[in-house]
Image (cartoon, rainbow, N blue to C red):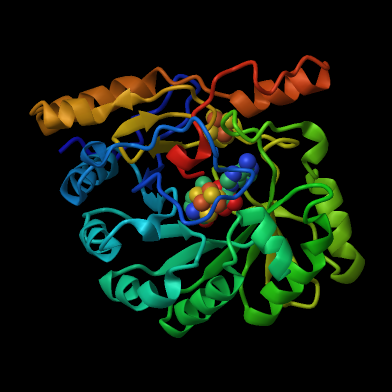
Amino acid sequence: MDRNTDGGLTDALGRPLKDLRISVTDRCNFRCQYCMPLEKYAWIDRHEILTFEEITRLAGLFVGLGVEEIRLTGGEPLMRHNLEFLVGQISHVDGLKDLSLTTNASLLAEQARGLAKAGLKRINASLDTLDRGKFHRLTRKDGLDNVLSGLKQATLCGLSPIKLNSVIQRGVNDDDIIELVAFARKNGYPIRFIEYMDVGNSNNWVSDLMVPKGEILQAIRKLFPLDEGARNDESAPSVDYRFRDGAGNVGIIASVTEPFCRGCTRARLTADGKLVLCLFSDKGFDLKRLLRGGATDGELVAAIRSLWSARRDRYSEERLEAMNSGEYRPNSKKKIEMISLGG
Ligand code: SAM
Ligand code: SF4
Ligand code: SF4
């Protein structure tokens, strides 16, 4: 197998391929306003969804090319039946250093034990408010209680760390920041706040709704003093700040105001087998066509190599340049929806 032991595979801007996000379904039981298109979205046909065997084969090839971390996502990954079988298969891929899952946590209460048994160590859970009514409005689902019991069950099953992700929107949940931080600290969950992004076209993103990192930090610091921030490694999107009282840390993912494209080592695989090289792409390369057309491992590896080598994406840096010069038009470019890409 073509193993990238010397760090040989880099893109056109010198970035290695180190992380892979695999979307296992585009279905979701929530309808978050900032993510889910309500109309005009063509759900992927069931026959087009990669099987667990196909995903595991591709995962092995990506690890051979240098991928160290795989994250399962969606849509809502726990909507995919028997996800723990896939976790079991991928966690045995030789050379993989880290396997994680991003979930809305609403189905975790039933599934955490099976996932942990299958080899999952940690999860990222999305939680944007602790207010029941607001949760309902944001996700269009009355699901807060299920999420909270899912988190509890995940803790009991030994999944650790359980990291919380919160997307902050102005006038929507910017007044929930302190309560979310207090909840995270109390439960020992590291929390990361994410600047609201213009992913896809259907959320009709406007920059006024995005709360920049500086404002989020200011809100937190009013109650919880923080030390200076640092990135854990250059390819990590989050800048982490330690609570001065020693109660863990809080991260900020400032994709809009402080883009980190130059350290971006991440590829994405959609549920129907498209390889996507940037969160803001308008299309992906159809690996499933090769897979189901009988391609050998060598042919698949060659295709991935050639795509990654030519990669020049730096959308968030370009967006910031355009925003600074007053020329940014969020919907002037067609982009794949978040629900297909998984974040
Ligand atoms: N359903 C799972 C969940 O919600 O965690 C996994 C998929 S979801 C697309 C992955 C992450 O993307 C979530 O943390 C969600 O909050 C984030 N997300 C979705 N739309 C976003 C947007 N417009 N800006 C920033 N983050 C977004
Ligand atoms: Fe579903 Fe996650 Fe998108 Fe919300 S953010 S609609 S939970 S996929
Ligand atoms: Fe990576 Fe594209 Fe995001 Fe830049 S905009 S960090 S290249 S996914």
Left/right placement of residue 133 relative to residue 335 reads right
Visible residue check, residue 174: yes
Q: Nearer the viewer, residue 16 or 115?
A: 115
- Residue 289 at x, y percent in the picture: 20, 26
Give the image location of residue 224, x and y in percent.
84, 70
Task: State how many labels appear.
Answer: 0
Instruction: Please state which of residues 110 and 191 is positioned toward the viewer in this rendering.
Output: 110
> Residue extending furthest front?
39
Task: Give the residue furthest to the bottom.
Answer: 156
- Nearest the viewer among 3 and 49 is 49
Residue 334 is situated, as x and y percent measured from the top left of the image, at: 55, 20
* Residue 174 image-quadrant placement: bottom right
**What residue is at 86 percent from the left and 49 percent from the top?**
215
Query: In the figure, 106 relative to 273: above or below?
Result: below
Residue 339: where, in percent of width, then height? 48, 42
Identify the residue at image location x=44%, y=21%.
Answer: 311
Residue 83 image-quadrant placement: bottom left
Decide which of 166, 62 is in the foreground and name it.
166
Vertical order, 206 against 163 (above or below) = above
- Look at the image and tell me in which quarter the N terminus lies: top left
Q: Residue at x 55, y 39 (%)?
A: 38
